[in-house]
Image (tube, rainbow, N blue to C red):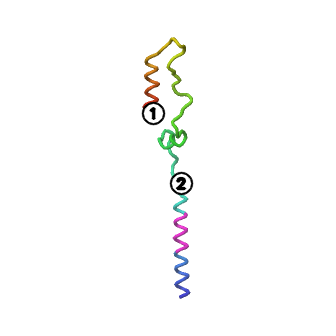
């Protein structure tokens, strides 16, 4: 009974060592333009260097194209 227990213990130890060795293997890093990497770096898709257009400057100025763009961004996020 003692030999059987030590054999089982030796096999369990060997299996555990193999699992740990396989878990520590290295994988190549993800490329910079990978969508997953971009999502992790910028989860809200916010970029401070983005398009800075606004829909007008003064009270009497109305830019229809800029207004349409702003409304599209509000209604279609």
- Residue 65 picture location, percent across and down: 43, 18
Residue at position x 47%, y 41% in the image: 35
Residue at position x 52%, y 79% in the image: 8
Q: Nearer the viewer, residue 21 or 74?
A: 74
Question: Which residue is denoted by mark 1 in the rendering?
Answer: 77
Secondary structure under badge 1? loop
As drawn, the residue found furthest toward the top would be 60
Of the two numbered discs 1 and 2 in the rendering, the one whose residue sits closer to the viewer: 1
Quarter of the picture containing the C terminus is top left
Q: How many marks?
A: 2
Please name the predominant secondary structure of the magenta segment in the image: helix
Instruction: Let me know if residue 16 is in the magenta part.
Output: yes
As drawn, the residue found furthest toward the bottom would be 1
Which residues fall within the magenta stretch? 12-20
- Residue 26 picture location, percent across and down: 53, 54
Question: In the rendered view, would you say 75 is above or below 5?
Answer: above
Specify few, some or many for label 1: CA neighbours under 10 Å numbering under 14, 14-19, or 20 or more. few
Question: In the rendered view, would you say 75 is above or below 9?
Answer: above
Q: CA distance from mark 1 to mark 2?
A: 39 Å
Specify few, some or many for label 2: CA neighbours under 10 Å numbering under 14, 14-19, or 20 or more. few
Residue at position x 55%, y 40% in the image: 41
Q: Nearer the viewer, residue 62 or 54?
A: 62
Question: In the rendered view, would you say 49 is above or below 22?
Answer: above
Residue 27 is marked as none
Residue at position x 44%, y 17% in the image: 64
Left or right side of 2 for 66: left
Secondary structure under badge 2? loop
Instruction: Let me know if residue 42 is in the magenta part.
Output: no
Question: In the rendered view, would you say 41 is above or below 64?
Answer: below
Upstream in sequence: badge 1 or badge 2: 2
Question: Which residue is denoted by mark 2 in the rendering?
Answer: 26
- Residue 43 picture location, percent across and down: 52, 40
């Amino acid at each position: 009974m003692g030999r059987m227990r030590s054999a089982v213990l030796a096999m369990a130890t060997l299996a555990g060592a193999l699992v740990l060795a396989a878990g520590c293997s290295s994988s190549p890093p993800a490329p910079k333009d990978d969508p997953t990497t971009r999502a992790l770096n910028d989860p809200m898709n916010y970029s401070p260097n983005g398009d800075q257009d606004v829909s007008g400057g003064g009270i009497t100025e109305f830019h229809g194209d800029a207004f349409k763009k702003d409304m599209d961004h509000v209604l279609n996020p």
